Amino acid sequence: MKLSLQFLPLALVLTAAVQAETPKFPGTPKVSSMAPYGWHRGSTVEVTFTGLKLFEPKGVLCADTDLIKVTKISPVEADPKVPDSAGKKAIASMEIDPNCPSGVHYLRLYTNYGVGEVMPFFVGALPTHVEQEPVEKDKTNNTLATAEALPGAATVNGWMLGDDADYFKYEVKKGQLISAEVECARLALDTDDGTEVILTVMDAAGKTLATCDDTPLLLADPFVSAIAPADGPVFVSIKPLLPSATGKRIPYRLHVGDFRRPAGVYPAGGKPGEKLSVRFLGLPLGANDKAEISLPQGTEPFRYQADAATPTPNPLHLLAGPNVLEVEPNESPSQATVSQEAAIPLALNGILEKDGDIDCFKFSAKKGQRLIIDGYAQALGSPADLQLEILPATAKAGQNPERADDSTDGDLNNFEQTYSRERLDPSLIFTPKEDGDFVLTVKDSRNLGSPLSLYRIEITPAQPGALMGFYSPDNNQKNSRISSQVARGNRALFLMNLRPTYGTEKITGELQVTARNLPQGVTITAAHFTIDQKRIPIMFEAAADAPVTATWLDLMVQPVDAQAPKLNSFFSHNIALTYANGDIATAAHFDKLAFAVTDAIPFSIKATQPTIALSRSGELLLEVELTRQPGFSDPVEIGVENVPAGIVPQTGTVITGDTTKTTLRLAAEGGAQFGKFPIVITARNRNTGDERAGRLRASSNQIQLEVSEPFLRVKLARSSVERGKRTLVKATIESVRTLPGAATMKLIRLPKGLEMAGGPVAVSNDSKELTMELTASADALVGTYPSIACEVAVTADGKELKQVAGTGLVRVDPARK
């Protein structure tokens, strides 16, 4: 089963300054960028967040470590000379612990009014050196002669513009390992095709020692390694592969030092807690490519650094079972590498070292044991595009194998926004038909291979599990902005996606959702549900005195029956960060949800429980009331959440600034499902000028919508009428349910020139037949109209319920002469 890295809840504590120009109700913040993108551990750095509505910043959520602490945060005061400059920036002072892991960490600024977008923040072990080239003057370090000298091994925070090339000089000793790595495309958030750069290491004379423009591990971001040919300087250059299309300055982080930068680590995992001997792939000849790793406990993949200064860790896996390494030759089933332990789970490791290479493994399995076989190559940064085939060891020539090539989001236990590269790794559910030995064949689907083409195959027993995700309340909201929040003294409904995890056969019985790390003063309400409901409404409610805060919320799904077997419960939230050719290039995976309690908002919404059911082919008006705080007169959009299939709510309903009440029309299609369904009315402020910034959102109390059979079924007899004359339309009536009050019936969907004479006619529970008179004008449209309908209007408890009870045909003829 493919799982993402574990993320731990952490709120970075701070003190917040209040900006005098803060609006009374700023609404949700939006963070569009952050600078700098990274710094070195064991230091303090000021980080500037830029965006909209960044009033009253309160803290920063960090996804995976408690070793980055915010000691102070404050808004940047508005420039009186710049219109609308208030709320555009906030500055956080951040302490990075000396033991903070290197690599990317994900930050989310939060204010008193919500949580901002995910921003990747890169932490390194090398001291940070800010490029000296002035922002206002380009190309001052663009040649060997003008190269900027580094004080030693360092990380450069720099910028490029157009076709600008930046050169840096680095002093080395003969035989020393020289490595360089760039973060550039990984910084191009929310844009397609981030800037690709060429990274080159040259000797003192300018001769190229190593060069690279992209890598299987880091995709568009390059890294290189070389051995110093002599004492003295070497030069490292970075330049765009193509000039910037936008004309904007391009940020980058360049790491230069003597760290080992492996393209891969083989084998790419082992047993939790064991010592694992590994080999680093892709290092230059003469570099130390061996290491022994003390693997951590647990089951989740982890990030491993070859050296303390290695900028980007390599992903390694943990599996509590035999770790089998291929033994060459193993190109055929008869030569297959054999697992010496007849045990599942099992991990198989190898390298497709040359074009056309094929690796075979033999393992044992029991009849009927449902197994998940996951291949990992692209997810490890390997260039291999794996294809798997499985056959019994006793298979006859020509027997078709079970085969797996690419994966889907379902195979990867994700709902959406998955790395495109992860889909190239195969996944297969395999159930042996007999006890025995089986041969697993591994190859590249393109018949390619290289010394870097490592892979890992994990065979695990399928276990029942439930996968959760959150559905964005705003359809046009990018996935990177999804968070959940509730205002003090208010409610907020969110919809949770639900499905069985990959490989789960069947989950029966009622389930329930619970939340850990719920903030003080917040309650969560969710009705019991079954696995096939797919979308579950969850209501958060905050007390009026709940502290304003933000946290990572841990959601779980388990059976209601305490005696039922426990489920493997997973929350999956994938946030796309950068794109290439329309596909996701880099993304962050979270197993917890960013959740905030915000300051009070200026409105709340209430829905009146309907006292009558909505019938098929009928309409129902819901009464909605908005409570406004003094001074708030903005228009508010009204919508419906958790609408059952077959129910069509009225759209575009707005409560204008001078009103507090409205009605919302619900229509039921003819095939709408019968039953009682919980629905909630939502209210959002309008005209914020942005799809998210400044949004305020509240949910009503939950009401039960009952969908029932119609009161009456009506059959309209065929009729005809001449222009300028009248005709009677006969209606045969069948009573289905007792009418709860006075009812009338009229003809609708009439063509131009036809009208019902005398208005609606009364109908009762005892009615069997009625006639309704139609008049045709002298210019009525001639023709046959098969879709006229009969509408029944029922009044109960002072409310009107409408139902389309039957259809019929009328023909309009020319007037006879």
Image (tube, rainbow, N blue to C red):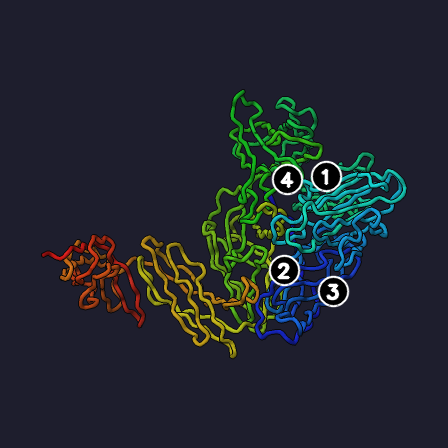
Q: Disc 1 to disc 3, how far (Cα)?
A: 36 Å
Q: Earlier in the sequence, mark 2 or mark 4?
A: 2
Q: Which of marks 1 and 4 is nearer the N terminus?
A: 1
Q: Disc 2 to disc 3, how far (Cα)?
A: 19 Å
Q: Mark 3 points at which residue?
A: 93
Q: Which of marks 1 and 2 is nearer the N terminus?
A: 2
Q: Which residue is drawn at 50% across and 68% down?
A: 685
The single residue placed furthest to the left in the displayed view is 817
**Proximity of marks 2 and 3: CB atoms separated by less than 8 Å:** no
Q: Earlier in the sequence, mark 2 or mark 3?
A: 2
Q: Disc 1 to disc 2, how far (Cα)?
A: 35 Å
Q: Mark 1 points at which residue?
A: 265
Q: Mark 4 points at which residue?
A: 378
The single residue placed furthest to the right in the displayed view is 231
**Proximity of marks 1 and 4: CB atoms separated by less than 8 Å:** no
The single residue placed furthest to the bottom in the displayed view is 630
* Secondary structure of residue under mark 2: strand
Residue type (three-letter) at the residue carrying disc 2: Ser
**Proximity of marks 1 and 3: CB atoms separated by less than 8 Å:** no
**In the rendering, at what x and y percent does residue 126 appear?**
80, 52
Residue type (three-letter) at the residue carrying disc 4: Gln
